[in-house]
Amino acid sequence: MAQKPSIPKGTRDFSPEEVNRRNYIISTIKKQFQHFGFQPIETPSFENSSTLMGKYGEEGDRLIFKILNSGDFLSKVKDDLYAEKDSLKITSKISEKALRYDLTVPFARYVVQHQNEVEFPFKRYQIQPVWRADRPQKGRFREFYQCDADVVGSDSLWQEVEFVQLYDSVFTSLKLNGVTIKLNNRKILSGFAEVIGESDKLIDFTVALDKLDKIGKDGVIKEMKEKGIAEEAIEKIDPIFELNGDFSAKINGLKSILSTSEIGKKGIEELEFIQRAIAEMPLKTATLDLDVTLARGLNYYTGAIFEISAPEGVKMGSIGGGGRYDDLTGIFGLKNMSGIGISFGLDRIYLVLEELDLFPEAVEENTKIIFINFGEKEALYAMKAVRALRDAGINAEVYPDSAKMKKQMTHANRRNIPFVVLAGTQEMEAEQYTIKHMASGEQETISLDKIIEKLR
């Protein structure tokens, strides 16, 4: 008995309807990327491991899918190393490549590798799949698409302002009103670590803090203690858990907490710049909010940090995020190249639009009209008409076999094809076509020109 086929956990097949809906989201995002002046690039699905490892923090490194070397990949592993059964040590010997974890680090590699070919500031967008060895759950997959936009070669805060507007424009175009654009700054987090005397544990501090919405205040404090952050230090930053009110109120609270930190005060200045600019150019449907616990757990952010929350009432993780990464290209040898980028979570946006029933009916790129096949002569007559319809930009086809009428009509119904054409001897002699609207049952006999006019 043949084994039942399956696919790996965390991956999915997509039906024609789902692909059409995904393409609707992608085309909407792409259109806004182009409106804002971004250019498209693509990078390989896998990179050298050295390109990816060490760029996402300890947790991120564990989630990178490694690719085994070709051939006898164990031949280079010495017996004593193999006997240790230390997977981290062995991995570097048996795997030199890995599936990309995101699009940002490969983009940084691209910029460095092609620095003499691109014009700076370089604004690029990229829509491709990425892979993470994560635990699958609702809205979290092991293979998923990211839709990224980045700018490198400018440290101007107007770029941050533009990205806030870009987020607002995309979600407004998708009719997804009420999203929240959460904003923070890595300098604020560095300031927190500085005022509590734990600057050397900044990464541990931010990784724990970023989990606040998942494990709560007590869980964050517990994890900080486990990472060696002193209890007295944790007590000093307790006020950040109580910050509330609007953007301005939270800024005032920060000024009090970070009064002794120069880097913290610099972060406050950058946040205020963005807030003032957006106040002069109000967002259409999104809300800008300051979230001082937002860290996103990634090592390469150095300034602004973004995260997008779905409208209130929709239980979903972030549907987008990003930030400023001043020293990312420096990792690959290109110094003093400031960058900032954001990402849209295609799969999660899909789930939100589906839950809120926001996909327009016109999304389906279905066949609009199908011709019944009565035999060889009739099929040829139909095929000539189909070619004219396709030339006119109308999705059309002929049923391939001269099967029973009932079977052909059932096929049209199951595929939700709105119009069926019956063209037999009588219609052929009159150079006419009988077109039937499947929903209403109404039909009429008209010329091909009239059909084209009707369907356009």
Image: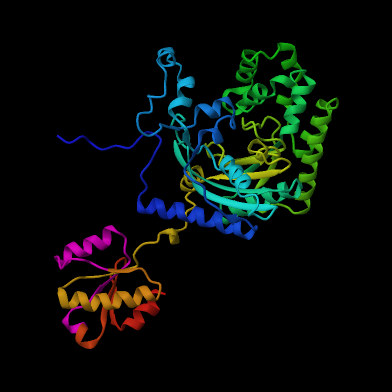
Whether residue 412 appears in magenta in the rendering, the answer is yes
Whether residue 24 appears in magenta in the rendering, the answer is no
Quadrant of residue 213 in the image?
A: top right
Give whichever of 448, 295 is nearer the camera. 295
The C terminus appears in which quarter of the rendering? bottom left
- Please state if 292 lies on the left or on the right of 438 as rendered: right
Residue segment shown in magenta: 398-427
Image x and y of residue 260, in percent: 85, 25
Taking the spot 41% from the left edge, 32% from the top edge, the residue there is: 69
Image x and y of residue 230, in percent: 71, 12
Visible in this render: residue 174? no
Visible in this render: residue 195? yes
Q: How is the image coloured?
A: rainbow
Residue 62 versus residue 372 in the image, above or below = above
Residue 60 versus residue 386 in the image, above or below = above
Image x and y of residue 231, in percent: 71, 11
Residue 39 versus residue 252 in the image, above or below = below
Taking the spot 79% from the left edge, 38% from the top edge, the residue there is: 248
- Please state if 149 lies on the left or on the right of 18 as rendered: right
